[in-house]
């Protein structure tokens, strides 16, 4: 079962409800919170605008998270 990595800023979390059962981390503090993400599950990076999900997804791949996909504007895009 995949897990969602919700990497929105705090003010975006106040505007829109988060993804249920997601691992929440800010885009700015992602390096500090990356150890909370499970390595044995597929990770879907969720970001409101979608453009900031690309460096987060590539960063997860560099940290040996091999099953990573990103979501742009709520639509699932191709795996990174």
Image (spheres, grey):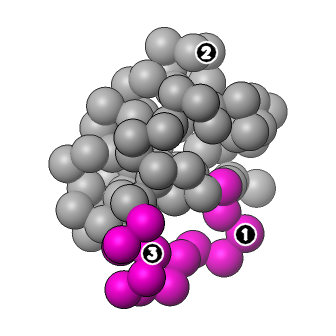
> Which residues are drawn in magenta?
10-23
Picture quarter with the N terminus: bottom right
What's the residue at 61%, 24% (across, down)?
A: 65
What's the residue at 63%, 37% (across, down)?
A: 33
Q: Mark 2 or mark 1, which is nearer to you?
A: 1
What's the residue at 50%, 37% (across, down)?
A: 30
The residue singled out by tag 1 in the image is 21
Q: Position of residue 70 (x, y in %)?
A: 39, 48
Q: Position of residue 73 (x, y in %)?
A: 27, 69
The alpha-carbon separation of the residues under discs 3 and 2 comes to 28 Å
Q: Is residue 76 visible?
A: no
- Identify the mark at residue 64; answer none if there is no mark: 2
Number of numbered discs present?
3
Kindly state the secondary structure of the residue where label 3 is placed. helix
Question: Relative to 22, is 32 above or below?
Answer: above
Kindly state the secondary structure of the residue where label 1 is placed. loop
Q: Mark 3 or mark 1, which is nearer to you?
A: 3
Mark 3 burial class by Cα count in 10 Å: few <14, some 14-19, many 20+: some
The alpha-carbon separation of the residues under discs 2 and 1 comes to 22 Å
Q: Nearer the viewer, residue 2 or 49?
A: 49
What's the residue at 31%, 31% (across, down)?
A: 55
**Upstream in the sequence, badge 3 or badge 2?**
3
Q: Nearer the viewer, residue 8 or 11?
A: 11
Kindly state the secondary structure of the residue where label 2 is placed. loop
Q: Position of residue 76 (x, y in %)?
A: 37, 60
- Identify the mark at residue 13; answer none if there is no mark: 3
Q: Tell me if residue 62 is in the magenta stretch.
A: no
Picture quarter with the C terminus: top left
């Amino acid at each position: 079962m995949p897990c969602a990595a919700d990497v929105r800023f705090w003010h975006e979390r106040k505007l829109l409800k988060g993804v249920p059962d997601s691992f929440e981390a800010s885009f700015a503090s992602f390096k500090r919170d990356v150890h909370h993400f499970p390595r044995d599950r597929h990770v879907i990076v969720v970001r409101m605008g979608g453009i900031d999900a690309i460096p987060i997804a590539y960063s997860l791949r560099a940290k040996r998270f091999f099953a990573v996909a990103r979501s742009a504007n709520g639509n699932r895009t191709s795996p990174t």
